[in-house]
Amino acid sequence: MREVLAQAAFQLFLERGFERTTVDDIVARAGVGRRSFFRYFPSKEDAVFPDHERCLAEMTEFLAAVDDSDPVGAVCDAARIVLRMYAANPEFSVQRYRLTREVPGLRTYELSVVRRYEQTLAGHLRGRFGEGGDGELRAEVIAASVVAAHNNGLRLWLRSGGEGDPEEAVDHALDLVREVWARPVDEVVPVSARPEREAVEAAGAAASLPVSADGEVVVMVARKGTPMWRVVQQIEAAVGES
């Protein structure tokens, strides 16, 4: 019945326009009563996106069971569940995309659905990175990156009219996300650890400092704000002593 109602609604939206179609029109086309419609859809906007609730549930189930050794890879794979939903019915997906471009209210509704996907991904990542500080920030940023990458590839395919392989563009975009964010969390230096972070940065910069005659590298760590003359003086002293 859910599919029958969604099909009837979408046919009417294409024939008459979204704004000119009422719930009464939809149930008349489907041959059911108003109560049946509202049992499945809170509003006619929901009838445009009949598959997202199922997809969100599938994504949540997938993330609950996934191996946690590669959290960024896991959320990228979870995003592909949404792609497969769109790819399963290219004609409907393209028509819906065009309809949402024409109706501002549907575009707003779609953005709210996208946000729910993003929150689901971020929730999984917070479980891996931690709920506070940089862990939570990292989770939110990665989730937003995954959603943006997925949607970029998906919309390229939708704008083409559903031609070609939708996975190619999405995989390319998600690979970029993994390349940037897949570094193990244990290797990330928290922003809150200022003294340790500054020491690491200073040591990294020191790799280009002069070496002694026998080739031994001299590394010096100085506090932030140390006068340059003092830094040079200490380097010269260390090189001279070696």
Image (cartoon, helix red, strand yellow):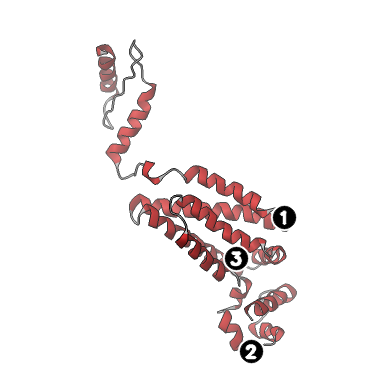
- Mark 1: secondary structure: loop
Label 1 or label 3, whichever comes before in sequence order: 3
Residue 242 locus on image (x, y percent): 27, 13
CB under 8 Å between discs 1 and 3? no
Image point (52%, 47%), residue name: 177
For the residue pair 138 and 76, the one nearer the viewer reads as 76
Q: Which amino acid is tagged 1? A: Ser
Residue 58 locus on image (x, y percent): 53, 66
Residue 99 locus on image (x, y percent): 68, 67
- Mark 3: secondary structure: helix
Quadrant for the N terminus, please: bottom right
Which residue does the numbered mark 2 point to in the structure image? 33
Label 3 or label 2, whichever comes before in sequence order: 2
Q: Is residue 211 left or right of residue 35?
A: left
Q: Is residue 23 visible?
A: yes
Q: Which amino acid is tagged 3? A: Arg
Mark 3 → mark 2, Cα distance in angstroms: 28 Å
Q: Which amino acid is tagged 2? A: Gly
Image point (33%, 55%), residue name: 132
Asked if 37 appears above or below 121 in the picture, the reply is: below
Which residue does the numbered mark 3 point to in the structure image? 107
For the residue pair 213 and 230, the one nearer the viewer reads as 213
Label 1 or label 2, whichever comes before in sequence order: 2
Q: Is residue 20 visible?
A: no
Which residue does the numbered mark 1 point to in the structure image? 160
